[in-house]
Image: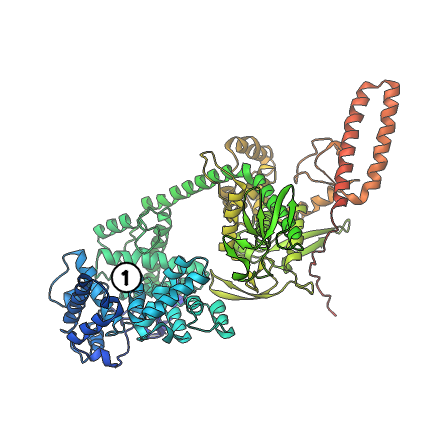
Amino acid sequence: MTAEILTDDDRTRPYSDSHGKVRRLSLPQPAVPAENGNTVTTPVDWPRTHCSIEKALDYARSTPFLRDAPWQVRTHATQRLREALAALAKVTGNSWQERWINSEIEQSQAPFEALISLKGRAVRRRYEVRLAVTGLTWAFAVDLIRPSYEFLFHQVSAMRKAAPFVLSTRDPEGFTALQAGIGRRSKNPERVRKAALPQLARIMMHTGAPSIGDIEIADVEQAYAIGARILPVPPAGATYDALTWAQFMPEDGAAMVWGHQKRVGQLSVEQLVDRTQISPGRIRDLLVVYLRARSTSIDYSTLTGLVTTLAKNFWALVQQIDPGVDTLRLAPEVVVEWKERVRYIQPGHGRAGQKRVNVGSIYAAVRAFYWDISDWAHQSPERFAEYAAPNIISNDDMRLLANEASRQRARSHARTRARLPFLEALAESVETQRSWYAEALKAASPLGLGDSFTVQGVSCTRTTRMSGKVEQGRRPHATGSRIFVTRHDTGQVFDARHLEDITFWQWAIVGILKETGMRIEELEELSHTSLSQYRLPSTGELLPLLQIAPSKVDRERVMLISPDLADVLTDVLERVRDKNGRVPTFERWDSNERLTLPPMPLLMQRDVNGRRSSIKRGWVMDQLLLATTAAGLLDTDGEPLVFQPHDFRRLFLTDIVATGLPIHIASKLAGHRSVNTTEGYTAVYPEEVFTAHRLYIERRRAARPESEYREPTDEEWDEFHADFDKRELELGSCGRAFGTPCVHEHACLRCPMLRVNPARKDRLVQKKASIERDLETAQRQGWVGEIGILKITLAGAEQKLKQMEAATSRPASVSLGMPALRQPA
């Protein structure tokens, strides 16, 4: 990286922060402090903010919350409110809102401690902070102060606890109706309350809305947009749902479009850095310039990870250790303390306090940052010389990265070996579940309520109830009315239409991942245009191909469609096609890149609440969990065995390498840049590595000693495709691995690797009749040795004939509808 990609405007270019306030970088002028980017509430006047302290206490006592509360609660609340207002009264201003703004509490890193400091003393006890939180919350609740959204979003924990109290204080009847609506309509009421109530409380405190019914769609949109630019994860979309369920907002078309489609796109580098709550200063501005330069060569998801590493896990943590630090030349004791703290996940994360498993990657990013700044200092000393400093990450520290990689590889291999024996059991289980529920739906659909039927020997009855709720009282299913069925062997009451749908997708997901080893993001992007075909020049045979779009690396790859994968893709196409036989196209939101992708005929789509939607990775992981639970798979310790989407990728590569495919060809199929990456995925057992892969390399080392660990040449890749021509036989094709000799000496009728072609059944019947005649002759002549060979050959011919008959007895195949390229005029 060089400084040439930066312009002289970097230090003066204006930009808008998360609230639209215009800011400028101060680099490289440390004498001029960076302008604070915190957003404060614009001074406004309303009657209550001008009241006296005693009048404010009367407002608090008159609220329904305190009016009916015990005197101890009433006394405690009013005393805390009095203390908070008394502290603010020391600040200049004509109203409580003006005093709040002039106090600059919102700009403080510790706002509640700043409120206490207005009294002229420091914080001595933790409970003093809790008392300050209570006092300020009451000032917000009775509408004396209207804080900014930024302040409210930075106090996530305090607002979550205060939300029910604020809502019940402002609008007790509306709060009761809101709770009832959530309980009546939501499948997970507690989850909706946890997401929606704090957001509604923020809106009411910021806007001064006297009741929940006064909240408008614009208020919800504004709060969502600001929260999405401050919080690491955007606020949940349950706020609008809760308001509509309680009938505070209409469920009209325009609002529903906003509720489902409004997304927060890519944030600027400045916004990404600022939402880590890093303090303004010279190093903050240097990080912005550095990350902006790096953003030109990496994708957005990688950029967000780099921002988290450098801004949050490095510099924000250093600022906590040494407040006021403004140089990369850190004191040794600060470096030691930072290295100790970064080993553990910091507060603000769901796994806070747990030990990190990727400290080495943080070290690598910080080391590269120091090196790049030093390089810039040599090229542009007038701009960056004052920031150059000795690297705080030593070579000894970097050994941690190699150790972590080794441990991660060992964990991945152990996970793969634990799941490899159960892969076929999982595939059989999802096939069984899919078949059973499909038959149950087909049998129950034409029946009336109370009618009985049998599914694969299990007695069932069409019913009207599910979990004690009447069918007509529930919302209709997306693709039609629900069909409730009671299964008498287990007593289970289920929706046959719903379970048929999810078991089908469980089967399809497992089948596609098992046969391709694709990444989860590649599965999301799989479309109808991914299917293509290739005609062999020698025989004219059409080979079905699957074109996998690049995801993690920009390397598009093509792989052959196996017969099992063809069955899965055929059924998926039949399900997603519309009444005109076309695969519907629609836009897809890429959650990693924060972009809306152009309309595509995606294969991973299903009907959700009457609307076609792409299948998300979270739903895929949920279905894999349900599938493995239904299969009853247990590890050696008796714990449930769960398959993640990436497990199938490791299993696929392990299987094809263990069965003889050269690893550099496997690397090409997987889309890896390096064969070393593929080696990390292949969890071949140590004895198999020694007896198979290493011996294979040694046998060919004399001929081409370095050829096994390189990119295959175009000639080798053509040889790999041409090998399929050589496998064409009289009765079908040979399924042996590429480059391996025939172990059965071309006795194809006795070989399990022969893939019979049903179209050549007449040839097999003729050969079988010929073998029977030869056997009769041998028996008459007493040729004992020949009799044994002919009997084995005849048994193989009969087995192959059964395979042909089974193949021809299947339902007629459905065309995949592979797109054909239009010839130019």
Q: Quadrant of the N terminus?
A: bottom left
Pointer 1 local density, CA inside 10 Å: few below 14, some 14–19, many at least 20: some
Question: Residue 130 at x, y = what percent?
Answer: 21, 60
Question: Residue 796 at x, y = what percent?
Answer: 76, 32
Question: Residue 298 at x, y = what percent?
Answer: 45, 60
Q: How did the renderer colour the structure?
A: rainbow
Q: Is residue 33 visible?
A: no
Which element type, helix, strand or loop, lies under badge 1?
helix
Q: Nearer the viewer, residue 767 or 744?
A: 767
Location of mark 1 (residue): 158
**Residue drawn 55% across the image and 36% down it:** 421
**Is residue 10 depicted above or below 554 in this figure?**
below
How many numbered badges does the structure rendering display?
Answer: 1
Tell me the amino acid under the disc marked 1: Ala
Q: Nearer the viewer, residue 309 or 513?
A: 513
Q: Quadrant of residue 307?
A: bottom left
Left or right: 296 as drawn, with respect to 161: right
Q: Nearer the viewer, residue 85 or 822?
A: 85
**Is residue 525 depicted above or below 825 in this figure?**
above
